[in-house]
Image (spheres, rainbow, N blue to C red):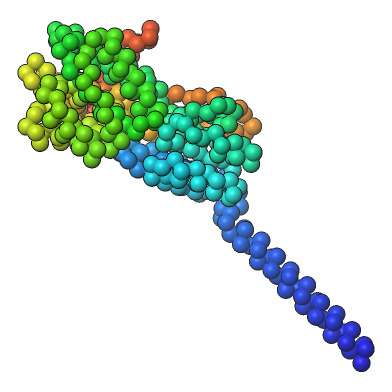
């Protein structure tokens, strides 16, 4: 009888051990199913700030079409919907998921120290894309790639400066409003500074700076109220194309005419980005007088950085993208800014067609 009891106990122990083993296997499988199908793909957690503009859509598309499974990546995409708190949550999730790289397109510059320290402690490289972060220690991120937003502002305002000189218009006759982008975002800070500095230097009448959130709806809304507040506006500086589209709608709805003919009462619209055909076509039609380019195609640029890191290289800390300035008006062909000459690209339908291919 004793023997039978011992045999039963041994059998029971074996069954427990097998079921416990099965449990471990199934846990491992659960973990494994979260890994990329090939088991070799590089996993990227991308925290995009939102979907406010045509530029942003083009930027998201560039990232998604670059970091594909065919190219050897798995990209976990999180839309922050313009909220830094959502982006911080996304980064913490990426850390928990032990991604290989975190790519962050930050909505505003400040407030990233803590979460970037957490990513650093977890040993995950962070690549900042588009707007910058303003952190106490630059070692909290690996590198940054994006635009020189202040230079964009300088280009747009120098174009205006040259244009009114050619037209024989006095600087004090320039009554300008600034529809700003999301306050605290690098693109807003740089472009706003570009205009404020130029207005001060040239003596333009900067009537107002209002937040347009980089969206068409807000651009239209704030332009409508600016037109009721100020009756002498002759230049509208829009910090992106979507705001420009909204401002143009508001000006036309109020019975105004947009264009570069300031002497005959037209209201000049200046913009940034130049992403989609609409902004370029508006420039060709002289609804937008000039656009300082902001290039959104960062996917291949981020990939080049990751390729370099994967091969053991050390990327530069900051990568600035080369950008153009577009106008269909022949008045200004060259700009000189801080000792560097920039050609103004005279826009034609051919150039637009090439850019959209
Ligand atoms: O940070 C880049 C800016 O953000 C682009 O100019 C704008 O269109 C976008 O929303």
Residue furthest bottom in the image: 1
Which quarter of the rendered picture does the C terminus lie within? top left
Residue at 39% x, 30% y is: 184
Report the residue at 6% width, 32% height from top. Answer: 255
List x then y, in percent, for residue 19. Answer: 72, 73
Left or right side of 33 for 319: left
Q: Nearer the viewer, residue 225 or 158?
A: 225
Image-quadrant location for residue 199: top left
Q: Is residue 213 above or below residue 335?
A: below
Q: Position of residue 211 (x, y in %)?
A: 29, 32
Q: Position of residue 343 (x, y in %)?
A: 30, 15
Q: Quadrant of residue 108?
A: top left
**What residue is shown at x 21% (from left), y 21% (from top)?**
207
Percent from the top left, x then y, of residue 91?
A: 52, 44
Question: For the view shown, which residue lies furthest in the front direction?
Answer: 229
Q: Is residue 38 visible?
A: no
Quarter placement of the N terminus: bottom right
| Residue closest to the eye, 265 or 285 | 265
How many discs mark residues in the rendered view? 0
User: Is residue 210 rendered to the left or right of residue 187?
Assistant: left
Frontmost residue, 227 versus 277: 227
Answer whether residue 137 is visible to the viewer in this image: yes
């Amino acid at each position: 009888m004793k023997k039978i009891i011992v045999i039963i106990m041994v059998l029971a122990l074996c069954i427990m051990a097998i079921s416990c083993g099965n449990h471990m296997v199934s846990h491992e499988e659960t973990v494994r199913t979260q890994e990329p199908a090939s088991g070799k793909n590089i996993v990227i957690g991308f925290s995009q700030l939102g979907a406010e503009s045509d530029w942003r859509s083009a930027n998201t598309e560039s990232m998604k079409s670059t970091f594909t499974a065919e190219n050897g990546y798995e990209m976990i995409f999180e839309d922050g919907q313009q909220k830094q708190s959502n982006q911080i949550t996304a980064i913490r999730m990426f850390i928990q998921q032990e991604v290989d790289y975190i790519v962050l397109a930050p909505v505003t510059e400040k407030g990233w120290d803590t979460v970037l320290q957490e990513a650093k402690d977890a040993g995950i490289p962070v690549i900042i894309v588009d707007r910058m972060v303003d952190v106490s220690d630059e070692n909290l991120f690996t590198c940054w790639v994006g635009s020189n937003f202040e230079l964009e502002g300088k280009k747009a305002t120098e174009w205006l400066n040259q244009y009114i000189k050619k037209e024989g218009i006095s600087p004090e006759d320039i009554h300008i409003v600034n529809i700003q982008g999301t306050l605290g975002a690098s693109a807003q800070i740089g472009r706003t500074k570009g205009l404020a500095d130029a207005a001060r230097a040239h003596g333009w009448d900067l009537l107002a700076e209002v937040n347009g959130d980089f969206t068409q709806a807000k651009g239209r809304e704030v332009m409508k109220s600016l037109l009721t507040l100020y009756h002498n506006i002759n230049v509208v500086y829009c910090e992106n194309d979507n705001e420009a589209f909204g401002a143009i709608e508001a000006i036309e709805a109020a019975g105004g005419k947009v264009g570069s003919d300031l002497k005959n009462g037209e209201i000049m619209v200046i913009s940034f980005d130049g992403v989609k055909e609409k902004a370029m076509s508006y420039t060709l039609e002289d609804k937008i007088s000039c656009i300082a380019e902001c290039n959104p195609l960062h996917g291949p640029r981020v990939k080049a950085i990751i390729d370099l890191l994967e091969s053991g290289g050390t990327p530069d800390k900051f990568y600035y993208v080369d950008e153009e300035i577009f106008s269909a008006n022949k008045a200004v062909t060259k700009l000189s800014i801080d000792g560097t000459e920039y050609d103004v690209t005279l826009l034609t339908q051919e150039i637009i067609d090439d850019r959209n291919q």
